[in-house]
Amino acid sequence: MAIKNLLVLAVFLSVLGGSVANSKGLDLNYYKHRCPDAEAIVRRVTVQYVSRQTSLAAALLRVYFHDCFVRGCDGSVLLKSPNKDAERDAIPNLSLRGYEVVDAAKSALEKKCPGVVSCADVLALVARDAVLVINGPWWPVPLGRRDGRISRKSEVNLPSPFAGIAALKKNFFDKGLNTKDLVVLSGAHTIGISNCGLINSRIYNFTGKGDFDPSMNPSYVRTLKKRCKPTDFRTSVEMDPGSVKKFDSHYFNIVSQKKGLFTSDSTLLDDPETKRYIDTQVATAGSSFNKDFSESMVKLGFVEILTGNKGEIRRKCAFVN
């Protein structure tokens, strides 16, 4: 694994145009002297949880994504509010889960290196290690993020599952991510699970006339209707049927067959660049997906980060100091 990781890291260094270390204040060896076992501690805790419940891999990846898209990767999604007005209280975040894994990793770190490792860094590492547990790709996580002190429900404006390609591209561009990052990170839906409540209008009453979204494969709609009755808002639905427990490129095959669960999945066929990427992954059995996903995850980890004297190092991830 060590040799493999070094080879992958060498690729990242060339892709990012130099050293990841000290880029925007982050460093792969940030805790080398003050908490040398930080990554090992986080990995041990993550493996304990995810190996027992593999669906946590998708859940934790989702928490990280939702954190980075609001105020950047600052751990603000982890904060609780007595008034229920924090990010985690916003409707898109009510279904987030896996907080206990981050809290357990942070607690273990506090026993070893109190007041050193930020919750933002813990979440970044947990997301990476959770994917690795289910045999997904590895990526380097430069460290040194600090924790935000502000978390507002009103600021949660995430890429919507109901959005078209133009809105999605703007969401990503606003965070310094490009069209390729959009389609690549959408590939995380290969391990995603949703519910009937988010798709019922799409399959039963798309335009208010009792119809379904014409961009969907009719046979897929029939399959979904067997699982989701019109008044069912709770039953779970796999986003990559038949491959939900495996992190692979199969999601792109599903989308190419017009079986994307959300509008945000199907609309990837509406843009030349995203469609070309999907077609390439289908034709090559996902030959570059793991590498591409890893590169986009590194980029995501730099979104609007706090470093230096900004923010703080929380003692408990759910509360400011």
Image (cartoon, rainbow, N blue to C red):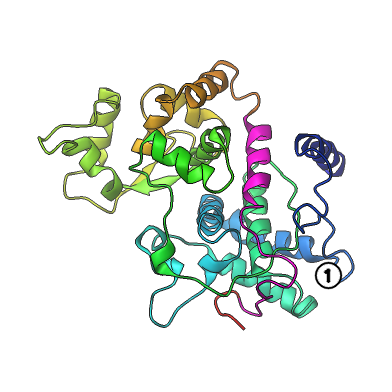
Image position, residue 133 (x, y; %): 65, 49
Q: Residue at x 70, y 63 (%)?
A: 145
Q: Which quadrant of the figure contains the N terminus?
A: top right
Q: In front: 305, or 279?
A: 305
Is 222 situated above or below 54? Answer: above
Q: Image quadrant for the C terminus? A: bottom right
- Residue type at mark 1 is Cys
- The percent coordinates of residue 247 (x first, y second) are 57, 38
Q: Is residue 188 left or right of residue 90?
A: right
Label 1, residues with CA under 10 Å away: few <14, some 14-19, many ≥20? some
Is 301 included in the stretch rendered in magenta? yes
**How many circles with numbers are drawn on the protein?**
1
Q: Circle 1 is placed at which residue position?
A: 35
Residue at the image point whose x is 65% and y is 77% from the top? 314
Percent x, y of residue 39: 77, 60
Q: Residue placed farthest to the top in the image?
A: 283
Work out which residue is located at the far right of the displayed protein and give it. Answer: 33
Which residue is at 41% across, 25% downward?
269
Asked which quadrant contains residue 60, the reply is: bottom right
- The magenta-colored residue range is 289-316
Q: Secondary structure at mark 1?
A: loop
Left of 40 or right of it: where is 194? left
> Residue 36: image x %, image y %?
86, 66
Residue at 22% from the left image edge and 36% from the top image edge:
203
Q: Is residue 109 left or right of residue 186?
A: right
Q: Is residue 200 magenta?
A: no
Residue 8, picture quadrant: top right
* Of the pair 5 and 161, the residue shown nearer to us: 161
